Image (tube, rainbow, N blue to C red):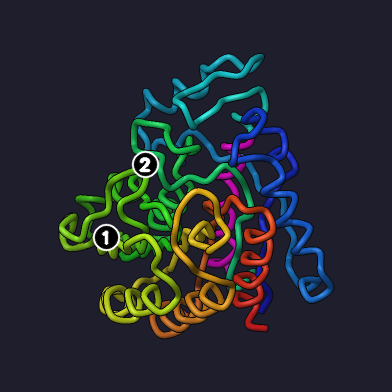
Amino acid sequence: MSVALFTHPVALTHDTGPHHPECPDRLRYVLRALEAPEFAPLLREQAPEATREQLVAVHDAAFVDAIFALPQDRMIAIDGDTIFSPGTLETVLRGAGGAVAAVDAVMEGKAKAAFVAMRPPGHHAESDRAMGFCFFNNAAVAARHAQAKWGLKRVAVADFDVHHGNGTQEIFFNDASVLYASSHQSPCYPGTGARSETGVGNIFNMPLPPGTGGQGFREAWREGILPDLRAFAPELLIISAGFDAHEADPLAQLRLTEPDFAWITEELLAVADECCAGRVVSIMEGGYNLDALASSCAVHVRGLMRL
């Protein structure tokens, strides 16, 4: 069965200004890589806009309304990292909406797996706060939609971005129906993700020291996360697929390479095969070396396609 690719050209209009690492070229490079002949079987879909109802299922209504109310005729710095521009609102709505549509495609059986290639990332967005380039938490919106529309009792979010997904953890910290598991560099932005942060037994963090390479990364997942994922037995697996743990990435100091991303993709698919009939929704998060991001995404999508 095919893999669905959800994206939208409006994501190229989210303007973060010159020299910002979260730039439109991130998506351009990824989509160019996914134009290779081997990716011709992808079901290419345009990401729709998320509804307010879908957003307020995980975000405070006042926060959502405040984002909608931002002026769309100029650039605004939400913080030192997070920039709102005239193209941002539609972009972030389609980022969350693409994640929702990906869940529906997988649950309907239209696709065995789906990859959402949008920007900016989402996993730093908390229930009431935009931060770390992120406005709405796409993975969290997808997880809650899977429960609301499809009646799922157990959804897992597996996050291998180099930065801890503080937003996803905060949203589900007291919700045993959603497991959140993350490997990430520590110390590093945003400063969360200690192993002691366990929620109600549903949060599994594996902080990795700077300089950790593929062996340490694989051991952390093999021994510290994958067994907990299997024990949770999710009915849907959502992946926060960040590629900034690559050795070439400028924003952190882990030392992964493309074979490591191929390995984690294969391992997560094995969990999905065992627990949830292979149902996987993968959402692009970070990755700020353009060539490394493109090649790593290609490896990941190739894995989703089981090529």
Q: Amino acid at mark 1?
A: Ser
Is residue 203 something one can see in this rendering? Answer: yes
Residue 29 in the figure: left or right of residue 228: right
98 in magenta? yes
Front-lying residue, 122 or 231 = 122
Residue appearing at x 56%, y 77% in the figure: 262
Residue 210 x %, y %:
37, 60
Per the picture, the main secondary structure of the magenta-coloured stretch is: helix
Say which label, 2 or 1, has the lower sequence index: 2
224 in magenta? no
Q: Residue furthest right?
A: 37
Q: Amino acid at mark 2?
A: Val
Under tag 1, what secondary structure? Answer: loop
Residue topped by disc 2: 58
Please tell me whether residue 92 is drawn above or below residue 36 in the rendered image. above
Quadrant location of residue 43?
Answer: bottom right
Report crowding for label 2: few under 14, some 14 to 19, many 20 or more residues within 10 A (C-alpha): many
Under tag 2, what secondary structure? Answer: loop
Calculate the distance from the C-alpha at mark 2 to the C-alpha at mark 1. Answer: 14 Å
Please tell me whether residue 286 is drawn above or below residue 71 in the rendered image. below
Residue 95 in the figure: left or right of residue 212: right
Front-lying residue, 83 or 99 = 83
Q: Residue furthest front?
A: 211
Quadrant location of residue 64?
Answer: top left
Residue topped by disc 1: 177
Residue 137 in the figure: left or right of residue 118: left
The quadrant the N terminus occupies is bottom right
Magenta residues? Answer: 91-108
Residue 54 x %, y %:
46, 41
Residue 171 x %, y %:
30, 45
Number of numbered discs: 2
